Structure formats: structure tokens, C-alpha cells
Image (spheres, rainbow, N blue to C red):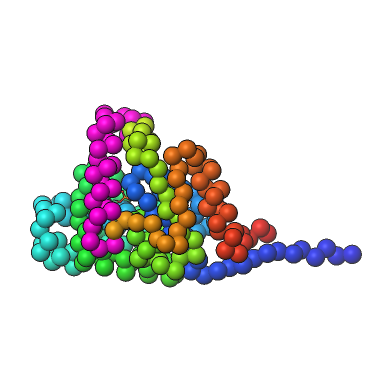
Amino acid sequence: MGVTKVTTKILIMGYSIAIDGPAGAGKSTIAKEVAKKLGFIYVDTGAMYRAMALFFLRRGISPEDTKRIEEECEQVNISIQYQQGVQVVLLNGENVNHLIRTEEVGKMASATSTNGQVRRKLVALQQELAQSCCVVMDGRDIGTCVLPSADVKVYLTADSKVRAKRRYLELKEKGEVCDLNTIEEDIKARDLQDMNRKISPLRQAQDAVLIDSSQLSPQEVMEKIYLLVQETGYRENKE
Ligand code: DC
């Protein structure tokens, strides 16, 4: 008697998971792992705003100089590649992954991401990526603006003290000198700026599920997200 192998394989093109939240909530760690487990592409939209910010910093443009930001932003080419599953951000063809993780670039990204022209350009790139493959995308406006029809939306947050402590430990591990109070003040200032800008401010989408990771391990957060994915009817290929 032959054995019939039954496999469940539901391939849904363009399935998307949106993860928004404030700085240091653990979005990228979680999004990366979820993408790996599901075989999706991880899209770190913050890295795109950071690459654009690096360009403005190199040109000596002030975050207040709206006119120059809008003129120069039209000349920049930001694109994304994947090398061994890792997102590589290209600024006019140059891999800038190793240059965009500084506090200076993060602050400039927060300041210049308030500009409508900068946002339009990067949102178009993000939407294009999501059309071509299944993605886990993290940022500030993914559920509210970039992918309003995302299959799963999560608003991931944590107490500012917890977020500051996580960032402090991360920096310390890298051997960087840092002060916990200064990090918390910077995080709060960034929250204020990202939540109060006029265009696409950071906020929880009405249909997003709130996850507060203050008391949760990354594994626990991931399990909550897998559950949400399963509730949409999505099944992994278990061949
Ligand atoms: O997630 P991050 O720290 O790398 O993001 C840097 C800044 O970019 C953040 O302070 C605000 C901006 N940003 C945004 O406005 N919209 C996004 N979708 C992602 C980031």
C-alpha cells in the first residue's frame, strides 16, 4: 500500500507583517527573527531614513534647511539589496550599512524624516518592495501609511527605562562609553519628535495589536506574533 503524503502549502504572494513602535522597542530583533522563521524578506525602513540622513550630513545640510533637503533629496538614489539574507542599503550605489548606526545619524534621520518629500520617496520604495514579495517591515508608519492593508499589524513598545537599559547594554557590549540617563533622555526626545511630526507621526494603527515587551523576552514576543499570523489562516510549508 502506498503512503500518500499530504502537505499543506499555502503560498500567499504579498503577505505582509507591519511592526511599528518607538526607538529601542526591539522591533528589528523581532522582525528579523520572524522573517527568518517564515522565509519572508525583512525590510528595515529606518535604515533607509538613516541612509538619506547620512547623505544630508555629508553635504553639510542642516535639518532646518527644508528647501535644500527637498532639492537634494531628488538627487539621491537609495536602494536595497539582500546579500546572504541581510539587507544592504545602498546610497548612490555605496553600501552604507556600517555607517548608519551612530546616534548622530539616528538623530538626523528623526529630524529629516519629518519632510514630506523625503517620506514620499522612501514610502514608494517600501511599497514597491512589499508588492514583489512577502515581507516583515518595521518602522514608524508601516501599519498606518506604508501598508495600510498589511495582514498582521503590531505596535511594539516598552517602557522608556527598559528601552534605554537595552540600548545601554548593547552599546556597552560593543565597547562604547555611554551613560544610561543620557540614553533615556535621547530616546524620549526621539519619541517626542517621531510622535508629534505633522506627516505620518508614529502611532498605533486602529487595527494593530499592541505588544508591550517591557516584561517579555524576545521569544515571548515572537510567539505572540506567530499566533497572530496563524490566526489569519497563514500556514507555513511543513514538507
Ligand atoms: O528605526 P530607526 O531608529 O532606525 O529610525 C531612525 C529614524 O527614522 C526614526 O527616528 C524616525 C525615522 N523613521 C520614520 O520616520 N519612519 C519609518 N518608517 C522608519 C524610521
Q: Toward which corner of the image does residue 137 lie, by quadrant?
A: bottom left
In the foreground, 220 or 211: 211
Say if 20 sits above or below 172 in the image: below
Q: Toward which corner of the image does residue 233 lie, by quadrant?
A: bottom right
Give the residue drawn at x 26%, y 68%.
Answer: 120
Give the residue drawn at x 25%, y 55%.
Answer: 196
- Residue 187 shows in the view: yes
**From which residue to which does the magenta span run?**
171-200
Say if 54 sits above or below 121 in the image: above
Residue 19 on image: x %, y %:
42, 55
Residue furthest to the right in view is: 1
Residue 32 on image: x %, y %:
45, 50
Left or right: 93 as drawn, with respect to 156: left
Give the residue drawn at x 34%, y 56%.
Answer: 203
In the foreground, 41 or 137: 137
Location of the N terminus (image quadrant): bottom right
Q: Count the numbered circles shown.
A: 0
Left or right: 150 as drawn, with respect to 179: right
Left or right: 5 as drawn, with respect to 215: right
- Residue 105 shows in the view: no
Q: Is residue 25 magenta?
A: no
In the foreground, 64 or 195: 195
In the foreground, 123 or 114: 114
Residue furthest to the front in view is: 206
Say if 119 sits above or below 223 in the image: below
Residue 199 on image: x %, y %:
25, 63
Give the residue drawn at x 40%, y 66%.
Answer: 147
Location of the C terminus (image quadrant): bottom right
Q: Main secondary structure of the magenta part?
A: helix
